[in-house]
Amino acid sequence: MDSSPEKTTKEVDIYRDTWVRFLGYANEVGEAFRALVPVSMVWASYAVATVYVSADAMDKGKKAAAEHGENPGRTTRVAAAVVDTFVWQALASVAIPGFTINRVCAASLYLLGRATRWPLPVRKWTTTAIGLSTIPFIITPIDRSVDYLLDSSLRKVYGGGPKHEP
């Protein structure tokens, strides 16, 4: 009998555990740069984040399908995995953080215009720096809030779902 401690190897989730996760933050970066770049660049950042969200949802659906094989209820489990992941990611990675960074940057630009005599380019770059520096501070509270929201609503409909680790 092997007396070594049991090794548990967690499968690497490419959408959560690798650099690919940063694609979900593309729209926050786009929002931070809104004052400096054409609006089409901001919308392009949303497209990148939306592709990330969709790819993660499809991946979780494929994993749920493989896990449940041909068991009864497989279609429901797969649909729940896709919907749960898509809604969670859409809220936690795109909609709420995008809105938050947009408002932080808009307020910063406004306040810098009222409180300083800095030239407009300096105010815009400062606004971008403020927006970028805000991103790390909003991720965990938004993720936890979206988990709470889904636990209190959508997940009750289909009997739960995996919580998302940031």
Image (cartoon, rainbow, N blue to C red):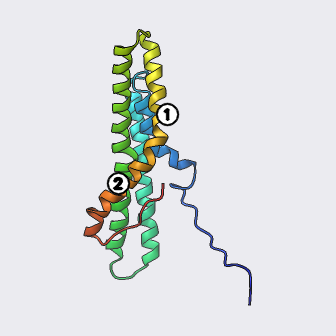
Q: Name above or below for residue 122 compared with residue 24.
A: above
Towards the viewer: 70 or 22: 22
Which mark is drawn over residue 45?
none
User: Is 1 above or below relative to 161?
Assistant: below
Disc tally is 2
Q: Residue at x 34, y 26 (%)?
A: 106
Instruction: Locate residue 158 relative to residue 117 in the image: left or right.
Output: left
Indicate whether 26 appears above or below 87: above
Residue 6 x, y percent position in the rendering? 67, 78
Along the line of sight, which residue is nearer the eye, 75 or 16? 16
Is there a contact, CB below 8 Å, between mark 1 and mark 2?
no
Q: Position of residue 135 (x, y in %)?
A: 46, 39
Residue sitting at 33 percent across and 38 percent down?
99
Image point (41%, 34%), residue name:
44
What type is the residue that disc 1 sits on?
Answer: Ser
- Name the kind of residue labelled 2 in the image: Val
Residue 88 in the image: state x and y as whole percent.
36, 55
Residue for badge 1: 133
Q: Position of residue 60 (x, y in %)?
A: 44, 63
Whichever of callouts 1 and 2 sits on the residue coming sooner in the sequence is 1
Q: Tell me the element at label 1.
A: helix
Query: Which quadrant of the figure contains the N terminus?
Result: bottom right
Drawn side of residue 120 relative to residue 15, left or right: left
The quadrant holding residue 83 is bottom left
Give how far apart the Cα atoms at labels 1 and 2 are.
22 Å
The residue under label 2 is 146
Element type at mark 2: helix
22 relative position to 144: left or right: right
Q: Residues within 10 Å of mark 1 (few under 14, many from 20)?
A: few
The residue positioned farthest toward the bottom in the image shown = 1
